[in-house]
Image (cartoon, rainbow, N blue to C red):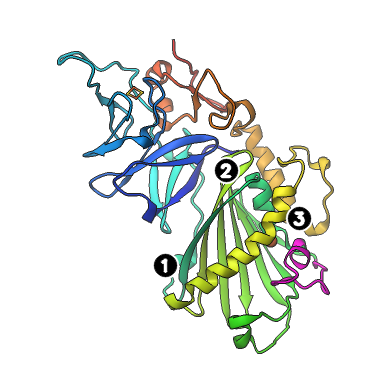
């Protein structure tokens, strides 16, 4: 799992004045909306006795721990300790990691890492979002599988005729012609020629049984987003899948599904039903893949020309691992294993203020270059 990226962790409509827990990179976070409408994000781990702030309440702009009532500002600083008699100060160590937040495309994005603003990888550009020709639906599920297996599945065109042979794949035309990849540091995509069968149901009536080859654009955006752009005879369907790594083997999948046909609300349920049907076909294979985690060594699996997009992903991932952005293995906080030590993703405040970082109670996770030395003395 990669830190130092913006992660879309929740749909905007799910975050209000009540604390809301989200999990990403094996760490729990608490989100809440301040009075000015902005969303705050803290590590969901009180430094006093490890209470979950997400079970607490919000007073004004502060989140209140449910256990002993300590109050934390959105910047992570504790400003009230009810057990202290009046006049007793707040210890400097009473501070929680606070993560930058922006809202974009109807989602709450948090920056999970300590890079300064100018060094942060970009949030992907979604041109359909502000285009009035498109309507969007929100869809989500939980997958009992690794997020990279889920990501690779979506950019993998060759599985379509087999896994989706009854939906939009065509088992009679399984060949994938060689394709060209457009790549930058943060994304890669390719136009791939597929031969789908004629669509069925409501969409089939519009398609007039045409069976021309169609160009499908598959792409990945680091760290966890995949795009699937399907050109149907009557319009465009563009899915952005956010594969949120809850832990190494559980993924929350959130989808923004854009379409420029049947743009009335009445067709939303039908569009969602189609995503569900396709997704359930993928779920069967992705949850059964072994090894569960994507190998680090390229030669551990066999790659064909038609797997080129996945190979670009694995190569780029390796570069970021070499840069120290990987979080995994023993770093995981949540899960079934009891631990004696809680660790968190380092937030930007630790880098900005090394004194503060040394005083921090919770240790950090992942070895990032230039990361301040951690630990609580
Ligand atoms: S555990 Fe949060 S106030 Fe004690
Ligand atoms: Fe699929």
Q: How many marks?
A: 3
Residue 296, given in percent of the width and then of the height, sits at 74, 37
Q: CA distance from mark 2 to mark 3?
A: 23 Å
Going from N to C along the chain, the mark reached first, 2 or 3, is 2
Q: Are marks 1 and 2 in contact (CB under 8 Å)?
A: no
Q: Quadrant of ligand 1?
A: top left
Residue for badge 3 = 308
Q: On residue 245, which mark appears?
A: 2
Residue at 63 percent across and 66 percent down: it is: 277
Q: What kind of element bears circle 3? A: helix
> Residue at (38%, 22%) from the top-left corner?
47
- Of residues 70 and 126, the one nearer the viewer is 70
Q: Residues within 10 Å of mark 2 (few under 14, many from 20)?
A: many
Q: Residues within 10 Å of mark 3 (few under 14, many from 20)?
A: some
Q: Which residues are magenta?
A: 159-177
The residue tagged 1 is 130
Q: Nearer the viewer, residue 83 or 342?
A: 83
Callout 1: helix, strand or loop? Answer: helix
Which quarter of the rendered picture does the C terminus lie within? Answer: top left
Nearest-to-viewer mark from 2 and 3: 2
Q: Which mark identifies residue 149?
A: none
Helix or strand or loop: what does disc 2 sit on? strand
């Amino acid at each position: 799992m990669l830190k130092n990226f913006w992660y879309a962790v929740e749909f905007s409509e799910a975050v209000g004045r009540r604390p809301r827990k989200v999990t990403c990179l094996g760490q729990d976070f608490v989100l809440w909306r301040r009075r000015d409408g902005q969303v705050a994000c803290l590590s969901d781990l009180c430094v006093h006795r490890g209470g979950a702030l997400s079970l607490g309440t919000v007073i004004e702009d502060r989140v209140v721990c449910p256990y002993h009532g300590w109050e934390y500002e959105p910047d992570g600083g504790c400003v009230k300790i009810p057990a202290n008699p009046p006049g007793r100060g707040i210890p400097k160590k009473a501070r929680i990691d606070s993560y930058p937040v922006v809202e974009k495309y109807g989602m709450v994005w948090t920056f999970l890492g300590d890079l300064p603003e100018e060094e942060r990888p970009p949030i992907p550009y979604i041109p359909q979002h502000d285009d009035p020709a498109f309507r969007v639906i929100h869809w989500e599920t939980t997958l009992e599988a690794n997020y990279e297996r889920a990501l690779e599945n979506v950019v993998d065109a060759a599985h379509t005729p087999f896994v989706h042979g009854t939906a939009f794949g065509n088992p009679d035309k399984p060949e994938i012609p060689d394709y060209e990849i457009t790549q930058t540091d943060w994304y890669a995509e390719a136009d791939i020629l597929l031969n789908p069968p004629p669509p069925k149901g409501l969409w089939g009536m519009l398609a007039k049984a045409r069976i021309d080859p169609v160009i499908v654009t598959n792409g990945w955006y680091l760290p966890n987003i995949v795009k699937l752009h399907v050109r149907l005879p009557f319009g465009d369907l563009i899915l952005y899948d956010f594969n949120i790594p809850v832990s190494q083997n559980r993924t929350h999948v959130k989808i923004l599904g854009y379409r420029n046909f049947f743009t009335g609300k009445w067709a939303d349920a039908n569009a969602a039903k189609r995503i569900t049907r396709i997704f359930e076909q993928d779920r069967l294979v992705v949850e059964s893949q072994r090894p569960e985690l994507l190998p680090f060594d390229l030669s551990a699996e066999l790659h064909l020309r038609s797997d080129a997009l996945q190979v670009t992903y694995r190569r780029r991932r390796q570069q970021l691992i070499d840069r120290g952005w990987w979080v995994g293995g023993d770093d995981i906080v949540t899960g079934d294993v009891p631990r004696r030590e809680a660790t968190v993703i380092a937030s930007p405040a630790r880098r900005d203020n090394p004194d503060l970082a040394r005083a921090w109670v919770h240790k950090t996770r992942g070895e990032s270059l230039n990361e301040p030395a951690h630990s609580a003395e």
